[in-house]
Amino acid sequence: MRRLAQIALFVVVALFLSCSDNSVVRHTEPLYTPRYAKGFSIEQDKSTGEKLLCIRNPWQGAEDIVYYTALDTVAPPKRIVAMSSSHAAMLDAIGCSDRIVGLSGCRFIYNSELCNKIAKGEISEVGYDSAFDFEKISALKADIVLLYGVAGEAKAMTTKLEELHIPYIYIGDYLENDPLGKAEWVVALASLCGVEEKGIEFFAGVEEHYNTLRGKQYCSAYKPRVMLNLPYRDTWFMPPHNSYMVRLIEDAGGEYILTENEHNTSTPISLEEALVLAMKADFWLNLGQMVSVEEVCATAPRFAKVDAVRFGRLYNNTKRTNESRGSDFWESGAIRPDLILEDLINILHYEAPTDSLHYYKKLN
């Protein structure tokens, strides 16, 4: 019976529906409409009464792609393979981390409980991309695989999963530019796991805290200017204005230094252009794996005399990083933007020391 339920879930999950495809028409009404997330909703089919998790355009460049997953006609998954550390953080937040049997990139996991299970062999590494271990997933008897598509549909992966009758679903949290939109995906995953109210309750707390913090910054006339990132092979990639990190900076009462980037993707600029921007910046954040001001200056020596360096205003999002470079900023931080916002407010307005921050550390 359990395997039949898995196959039933697979049939629904693996069904692509295009808005221009008249062969399948769903007439639904909303049960949960996200306030911030754009990639999912929870709906009810007016004809069948089915409760459905609806996921839209779950990879970059997707257009009119919709997944419908039945939530009340099959058993919630008990054995889950997650392809992203943010998925693991969501499952932990709703009390379902004990359902994880496989992870992609186990060595980059930060959560200590999950790390212990990995060390004991209770959670297995399943690989990634072309090194995806289908035999391992099949042996794990996974009820579902949580996928994400970075540059497009993971067609090779999903085709093989379909051949093996292993259910899968895309979780598109990483596509959300709104920090609260990214965090709101915890409700989608909670609904899939049969604990929707836990997801709603968790997100409500995050939302309230975030909006309270953000509201206080609107009254501030001081907008410290912020430089981001480090060069990669003589090119500096700067995020667009509608991006996740820039939204956090602006919600913290800061001003992103690159005022003219209105594109939807990161803009490559030269070191010369980056130096001009850095000279105007009050703070410099998100410096890769840098652990000291000395290391930053060795990596980008021409930037040693900019004000952010001279006045010691360099902060990196690496406070919660373990020995294998697992970063909790990208793990639990994905569902705790309120704590990241709190860090940024304390940094930009109070130049807070490391011991008072959640995810950031001051470079000395």
Image: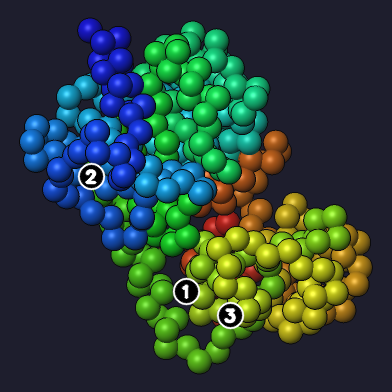
Front residue of 14 and 273: 14
Q: Tell me if 362 is positioned left or right of 141 in this view.
A: right
Q: Secondary structure at mark 1?
A: helix
Task: Quadrant for residue 198, please give it.
Answer: top left
Front residue of 305 and 357: 305
For label 2, count other residues whose C-alpha is less than 10 Å away and answer few (under 14), some (14-19) or many (20+).
many
The answer to whether residue 118 shows anywhere in this view is: no
Say which residue label 3 marks: 255
Q: Which mark is residue 251?
A: 1
First in sequence: mark 3 or mark 2?
2
Say which residue label 2 marks: 42
Whether residue 64 is situated above or below residue 229 in the rendered picture = above
For label 3, count other residues whose C-alpha is less than 10 Å away and answer few (under 14), some (14-19) or many (20+).
many
Q: Secondary structure at mark 2?
A: strand
Going by the numbered disc 1, the residue's amino acid type is: Asp
Tell me the quarter of the image containing the N terminus.
top left
Q: Residue 272's x, y, as percent?
A: 85, 74
Alpha-carbon distance for marks 1 and 2? 28 Å
Residue that appears at 30% across and 16% down:
6
For label 1, count other residues whose C-alpha is less than 10 Å away and answer few (under 14), some (14-19) or many (20+).
many
